[in-house]
Image (cartoon, rainbow, N blue to C red):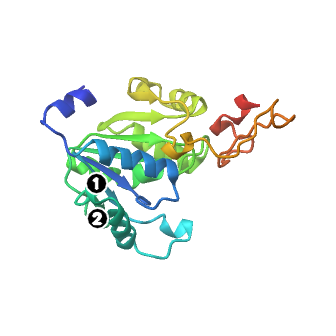
Amino acid sequence: MISFEDSLRRVARPQIAILDDLFPHPVSGFRFEEFTSYLDEMPEVSVYCDGDALRLVGEQRPVEAIIAEHLAVRPRHRGRVHPLVSGQLPKADVFYAIFLDNTTRYLDAIERRKKPFAFTLYPGGGFLAGGHGSDEKLDRVCNSSFLRRIIVTQHYTREYLLKRHPRVESKICYLPGGVVPRRAFCAPTGRKHFGIDKEVLEIGFVANRYTPKGEDKGYDLFV
C-alpha cells in the first residue's frame, strides 16, 4: 500500500484542500487557530467552507460575507479561502477535514477523485462512541482505501478506534489534547496566585460534554 508520505512526494508541492463547515468564523477558536496557522505557514493549503454550521452559532450572514471579513483583516490569505459549493469538490492532491461529519459528507466525492485524505477525529461533530449512526460513519471512513491518517486527540477515542478498527493503527497520529489558540498562552492581567494572594486552590476543567461522565474528553482521568 502507498503511504501518505509517498503519495505527497509524487508532486513537488501537493495542493492541500481543507473542507470545513465554519471557518473562518472565529467562534471556533481551536479550529480558527489551526487553519489560520496552515494558511500562514503553508502556501499550498487552501480552505473551502460550505457554511453549514454558521446557523448553529447564530450567524445569519452567508459564508461569503464571513470570508470577505476575514480576508480584509488577513489579505495574505487572499485566493486561498473560498466558499464551498455543494457538489463542486475543489481540485487538490490531498484533502483534510476535522470532525467525522465533515469527513463523511465529502467522502464519496473524494473517492471518485481517487485522492488521499486525512482527518481529525474530535469527540462530537458526528462522533459519539457507541452511537449507531456514529459507528456507521466511522466504519465508512476507516474502510476507505484512500484514508491515510487519522489524528486523534483523546486516549478514550484512540482506544475506541483501535477496538473497532484495529487495522488502522498504523494510520493513527495521537496528539493528546488538541490544538490550542495562541491567545491562550497570554497570561491574564491581575491574576491571583494560590498561597500568595488567595488561600483556595482553584482547578478548572472546561470542555463541551458529549457523554454522561465526560470520558470522551478525559474528565474521568482528570477526576
Residue 109 marker: 1
In the rendered image, which quarter contains the N terminus?
Answer: top left
Q: Looking at numbered disc 2 in the image, what kind of residue is underneath it?
A: Gly
In the rendered image, which quarter contains the C terminus?
Answer: top right
**Residue at image location 81% in from the left, 37% down from the top:** 197
Q: Looking at numbered disc 1 in the image, what kind of residue is underneath it?
A: Ala
Q: Residue furthest right?
A: 199
**Residue at image location 52% in from the left, 37% down from the top:** 178
Instruction: Indicate whether 166 appears above or below 15.
Output: above
Q: Position of residue 180 (x, y in %)?
A: 52, 41
- Whether residue 30 is visible to the viewer of this picture, yes or no, is yes
Spatial CA distance of label 1 from label 2 is: 8 Å
- Asked where in the image residue 7 lies, by quadrant, the reply is top left
Q: Position of residue 100 (x, y in %)?
A: 47, 47
Give left or right: position of 193 versus 142.
right
**Chain-order first, disc 1 or disc 2:** 2
Front residue of 102/193: it is 193
Labels 1 and 2 touching (C-beta < 8 A):
yes
Q: Position of residue 131 (x, y in %)?
A: 60, 46
Q: Which residue is mark 2?
A: 87
Instruction: Indicate whether 96 appears above or below 66.
Output: above
